[in-house]
């Protein structure tokens, strides 16, 4: 099988840093125990299992407040997706030691929306409903922002005259830049004066652009990543919609369905920003030695 190893792919610096922070915490005997991560430090079960094995336990739930309620003592680590000031305060009120692993690119958005609101703007934030990153960003500006995900959400927006007067747009870091552009254009049709800030991070953009250009000509794209990882799912979409190549997402080699490879000669491989490199290497090695039946 000819394998196109799409580059760049896999871990971004925000994920590498967050994992490093969690591993360091496990080694630091001065930190109060137990150590919990509030939500999935990155959306990848393999990485979570690795941290559990060294005593850093992941707690998950519908939102950060609900998760925090499970913690009585010790240390909490906030994830790369960022958390709201209210969640940080709630952790401090509970007497917990806090470690913040928020990605610097997410912090930029937190700072931006706070500045926009201080300047009198109402923020329309484009992001995924139920994802922790919008929860953290909108928590910075309670009452001064709204989350939209789809064109239908934009249609349904009802802003007050005061909010409409000064509107700004901000976005989640891991969206598809092409989808985002469509939503931004629709917002601008309704609010032509809206100030636009596209906050998709460089790591996400580079991985998407690499798939759009390098997967072209492949028979199939395999995207290695967790089903909850937004940037992983966007890579599947980019392959199908921009490169015109069907794509399948797998968590690891065990999910590779050989039926997909029938009659295929060239397979492109990429991975989400939260996928351990070793999982992707295993898939690439397997495909390189695999000969698909005609
Ligand atoms: S995908 Fe972007 S924003 Fe998210 S952790 Fe990686 S570098 Fe940071």
Image: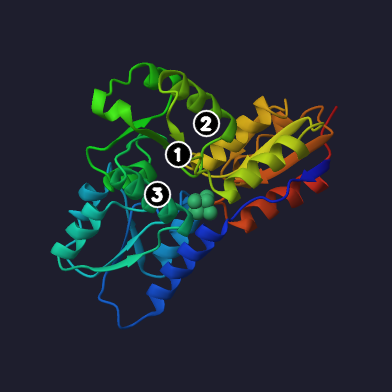
Is 222 above or below relative to 72?
Answer: above
Cα–Cα gap, marks 3 and 1: 11 Å
- Residue displayed at 18% across by 68% down: 73
Asked whether the viewer can see residue 140, the reply is: yes
Compared with 111, 24 (above or below) is below
Q: Position of residue 286 (x, y in %)?
A: 74, 48
Q: Quadrant of residue 23?
A: bottom left
Q: Earlier in the sequence, mark 1 or mark 2?
A: 1
Q: Which residue is mark 2?
A: 180
- For the residue labelled by badge 2, is the local secondary structure a helix, a strand or a loop? helix
Give the number of the mark in front: 3 or 1.
Answer: 3
**Between discs 3 and 1, the one toward the N terminus:** 3
Dividing the picture into quadrants, the one containing residue 12 is bottom right
Q: Which residue is mark 3?
A: 112
Residue plotted at (27% across, 44% down): 141
Q: Is residue 248 left or right of residue 38?
A: right
Q: Are marks 1 and 2 in contact (CB under 8 Å)?
A: yes
Q: Which mark is residue 205?
A: none
Which residue is painted at 28% across and 41% down in the image? 62
What whole-number distance in Å separates the C-alpha atoms at marks 1 and 2? 8 Å
């Amino acid at each position: 099988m000819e394998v196109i190893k799409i580059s760049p792919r896999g871990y971004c610096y925000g994920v590498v840093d967050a994992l490093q922070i969690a591993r360091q915490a496990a080694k630091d005997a001065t930190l109060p125990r137990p150590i919990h991560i509030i939500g999935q430090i990155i959306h990848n079960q393999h990485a979570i299992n690795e941290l559990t094995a060294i005593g850093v336990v992941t707690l998950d739930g519908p939102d950060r407040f609900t998760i925090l309620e499970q913690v009585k003592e010790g240390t909490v680590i906030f994830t790369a997706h960022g958390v709201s000031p209210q969640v940080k305060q709630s952790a401090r009120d509970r007497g917990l030691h806090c470690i913040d692993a928020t990605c610097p690119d997410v912090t930029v958005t937190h700072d931006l929306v706070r500045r926009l609101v201080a300047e009198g703007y109402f923020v329309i934030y484009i992001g995924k409903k139920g994802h922790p990153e919008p929860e953290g960003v909108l928590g910075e500006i309670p009452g001064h922002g709204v989350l939209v995900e789809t064109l239908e959400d934009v249609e349904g927006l009802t802003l007050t005259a005061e909010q409409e007067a000064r509107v700004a747009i901000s976005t989640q870091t891991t969206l598809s830049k092409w989808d985002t552009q469509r939503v931004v254009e629709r917002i601008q049709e309704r609010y032509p004066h809206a100030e636009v800030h596209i906050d998709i991070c460089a790591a996400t953009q580079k991985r998407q652009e690499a798939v759009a250009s390098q997967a072209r000509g492949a028979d199939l794209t395999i995207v290695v990543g967790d089903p909850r990882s937004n940037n992983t799912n966007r890579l599947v979409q980019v392959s199908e919609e921009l490169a015109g190549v069907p794509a399948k997402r797998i968590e690891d080699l065990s999910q590779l369905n050989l039926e997909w490879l029938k009659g295929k000669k060239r397979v492109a491989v990429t991975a989400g920003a939260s996928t351990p490199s070793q999982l992707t290497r295993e898939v690439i090695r397997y495909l390189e030695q695999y000969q698909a039946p005609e």
